[in-house]
């Protein structure tokens, strides 16, 4: 059995880097993916300008150690990236004693598909790929 996720989308904000008490570096970011919006008959919906309307979904992505440091250093809001990883579900109790659930993508590989935005535009750079170092200790 396998748990593999592949997403291609744009970063919703600059990645945030933090360190756990154990010394593990953790970078996290939001990734937006889009698909065509459909009407009640299942046909692609067009907006008033005649363009295909899109539905956007947001995903939480987490990277550890070397991969996390590279992402935090080089990725910026708006960049197009490809993320390969696995789904990870979490459960916790918040401060008001309410049980919460969440889902995130634990990234194993991130490819930069565009350069950081400078002046509003982005250009493809080819495939810049960063794999999770197999020697890094990854919790979970």
Image: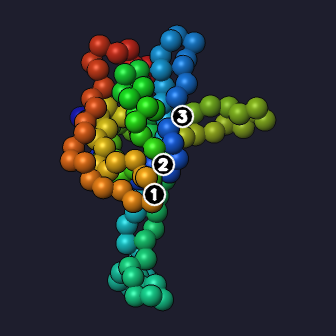
Alpha-carbon span between mark 3 and mark 1:
22 Å
Q: Residue at x 39, y 60 (%)?
A: 121
**Where on the picture, by quarter, is residue 93?**
top right
Earlier residue among tags 1 and 2: 2
Earlier residue among tags 2 and 3: 3
Is the Cβ of the residue at disc 1 closer than 8 Å to that at disc 2?
no
Residue 77 bears which disc, if any? 2
Residue 15 bears which disc, if any? none
Q: Is residue 22 left or right of residue 6?
A: right
Whole-percent x and y of residue 70?
38, 29
Q: Residue at x 40, y 47 (%)?
A: 116
In the rendered image, the quadrant that contains the N terminus is top left
Earlier residue among tags 3 and 1: 3
Whole-percent x and y of residue 25?
48, 20
Q: Is residue 45 left or right of residue 123?
A: right
Q: Nearer the viewer, mark 1 or mark 2?
A: 1
Q: Which residue ends up furthest to the front in the rendered image?
A: 119
Evaluate whether residue 6 shows in this view: yes
- Return the residue at label 3: 16
Q: Say what secondary structure mark 3 lies in.
A: strand
- Return the residue at label 1: 119
Q: Residues within 10 Å of mark 1 (few under 14, many from 20)?
A: few
Q: Say what secondary structure mark 2 lies in.
A: loop
In the rendered image, the quadrant that contains the C terminus is top left
Q: Looking at the picture, tell me which residue is in the foreground, 126 or 43.
A: 126
* Residue 68 higher or lower than 15, as above or below: above
* Residue 2 higher or lower than 43, as above or below: above
Alpha-carbon span between mark 1 and mark 2:
13 Å
Q: Say what secondary structure mark 1 lies in.
A: loop
Whole-percent x and y of residue 29?
49, 41
């Amino acid at each position: 059995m396998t748990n593999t996720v592949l997403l291609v989308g744009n970063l919703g904000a600059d990645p945030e880097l933090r360190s756990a008490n154990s010394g593990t570096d953790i970078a996290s970011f939001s990734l937006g993916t889009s698909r065509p919006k459909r009407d009640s008959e299942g046909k692609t919906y067009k907006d008033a300008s005649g363009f295909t309307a899109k539905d956007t979904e947001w995903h939480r992505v987490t990277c550890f150690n070397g991969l996390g440091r590279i992402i935090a250093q080089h990725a910026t809001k708006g960049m197009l990236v490809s993320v390969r990883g696995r789904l990870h579900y979490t459960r916790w109790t918040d401060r008001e004693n309410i049980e919460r659930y969440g889902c995130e993508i634990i990234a194993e590989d991130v490819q930069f598909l565009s350069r950081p935005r400078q002046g509003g535009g982005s250009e493809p750079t080819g495939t810049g790929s960063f794999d999770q170092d197999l020697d890094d200790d990854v919790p979970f």
